[in-house]
Image: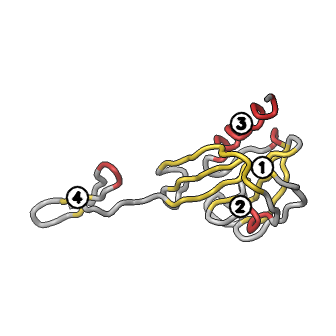
Amino acid sequence: MSLGRAPFGRFLIPRRSGPIVSPRYANPALVVDAVWIRYGKVLLVRRGHPPFRGMWALPGGFVELREETGLIGHPDRLVGVYSGPDRDPRKPSTSVAFLMAGRGGVPKGADDAASASWVPLRHAKPLAFDHAKILADGVRLSRRRRRK
């Protein structure tokens, strides 16, 4: 008998009398992503490890902004909450993305980031994970905010 997947993240466990639904859930990991846009550039890190090794990504994940870039910023506004079973090939994850503010500076890649840089928005692609969607939402939010 093969293992199957039941609705709502429950797994079917084989049993002699037939499969039963286990109460174990594949809960997503919580991550935080930073969308920091200054002077037409976005702060990105180049991933140093799989998945997406070598690709640009928003700083964040399971660590904080300072740990990956050496920069100190503060959350200015919520961009959105992004979730789904296929966001990260390692496991389901939910990301809370914030529009960042701060003094800026020269970023330096550390921890999971092979490098970090302020990248012109028009060159900020392709991005790892679903970061292109998050960045597009952050750019829209940033532009709406400037118009007010």
Badge 4 or badge 3: first in the primary sequence? 4
Residue position for label 3: 141
Check whether the beta carbons of the residues at disc 3 and disc 2 lie within 8 A of each other: no
Q: Amino acid at mark 2?
A: Arg
Q: Amino acid at mark 1?
A: Trp
Q: Residue at x 69, y 38 (%)?
A: 136
Indicate the secondary structure of the residue bearing disc 3: helix
Residue position for label 2: 47
In the rendering, at what x and y percent does residue 139 appear? 74, 38
Badge 3 or badge 2: first in the primary sequence? 2
Left or right of residue 98, residue 121 in this image: right
- The mark total stands at 4
Neighbour tally class for label 2: few under 14, some 14-19, many 20 plus, Cα within 10 Å: many
**Which of the two discs, 2 and 1, sits closer to the camera?**
1
Badge 4 or badge 1: first in the primary sequence? 4
Check whether the beta carbons of the residues at disc 2 and disc 1 lie within 8 A of each other: no
Badge 4 or badge 2: first in the primary sequence? 4
**Which of the two discs, 4 and 3, sits closer to the camera?**
3
Left or right of residue 39, residue 110 in this image: left
Residue position for label 1: 36
Left or right of residue 36, residue 40 in this image: right
Q: Is residue 114 shown above or below 93?
A: below
CA gap between label 4 and label 2 equals: 38 Å
